[in-house]
Amino acid sequence: MKVLVTGGAGFIGSHVVEELLLKGYQVSVVDNLITGKKENLPNGVTFYKVDIRDNLNQIFEKENPDYVIHMAAQVSVSHSISKPVYDGEQNILATINVLKACVQYKVKKIIFASTAAVYGEPHYLPIDEKHEWKPISFYGLSKLNAESYIKMFSELYALNYTILRYANVYGMRQDAHGEAGVVAIFIEKIMKGDRPTIFGDGLQTRDFIFVKDVAKANVAALENGDDMVFNVSTEKKTSVVEIIDEMAKAFNKEIFPQFTEEREGDIRDSYLSNKITTSELGWEPMYTLSEGLHDTISYYKNIAVEII
């Protein structure tokens, strides 16, 4: 079976590619390398440096993929606020372009990387898939619109899909200056000898899920969960202070964060239910926070040693 991964050279996408190869799939990748890096890709992958807003016919005709995993996106909340047109182009128009190619070339199924940002401020916890949608950023809004286009394409053209709404993903290859996940930012600060900054009291919580678990969810969705939407999460809430405590254990040293004013608009607490996901996809997160952080920090330490 052949799988085409858009954004496959990126943080999450490259781990999805690795998992696909591990499971014996033939893999091709389309990535414009604006945030992705070609060195993230393992051997055995056919690579196209192409923006998915461009004509994709030649690629689809040549590769003839059975499945498409659509990871390519503008993923920064702050960039979506400052550049809403670009955000809309990357997350809505590009998705429509991919969907058109999927229909034209009779792709069996598309897997879409969505986000917990579609929910906005939670009315109850854990957030399940029936929770109302009320994004508080253009990023969340553009992802929600992309979901709607996928569902409409499915209704009009019988295109099979699975939509995966990620919690807070962390792990190896995350760019502290790009996707700007708090784990990657903290690790960079600590390794430079700087004090990480915590906004507010540090007791705000999120659902942190390791990137390798996310990759396995994508592969599980190829054969399961047709025309459904799933949260990809640990169903556990973790505070920012707890992240610092776990990092202190992994680095084997005391860490003294500096606290500053809480950011306006930040959600206080959020974690996602994964009950339907584990039932329908036959998937469950395998990594504890401690294990995931240990592997992530080891990765960055090894990079630092190689640079020296």
Image (spheres, rainbow, N blue to C red):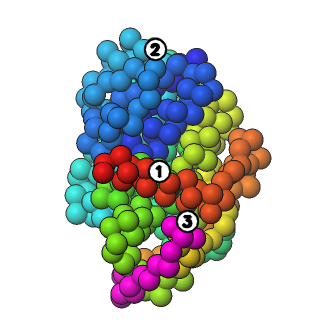
* Lower position in the chain sequence, tag 1 or tag 2: 2
Marks 1 and 2, Cα distance to the nearest angstrom? 35 Å
Of 186 and 118, which appears nearest the observer?
A: 186
Q: Which residue is mark 1?
A: 299
Judged left or right of residue 202, residue 74 is left
Marks 1 and 3, Cα distance to the nearest angstrom? 12 Å
- Predominant SS of the magenta segment: loop
Judged left or right of residue 181, residue 116 is right
Image mark for residue 64: 2
Give the residue type that dot 1 points to.
Tyr
Image mark for residue 250: 3
Q: Residue 264 location, x and y as percent?
A: 36, 82
Q: Which residue: 66% across, 59% down?
A: 288
Q: Residue 143 location, x and y as percent?
A: 42, 51
Marks 3 and 2, Cα distance to the nearest angstrom? 44 Å
Give the residue type that dot 3 points to.
Ala
Q: Residue 175 location, x and y as percent?
A: 35, 54
Where residue 81 sits, quadrant-wise, is: bottom left
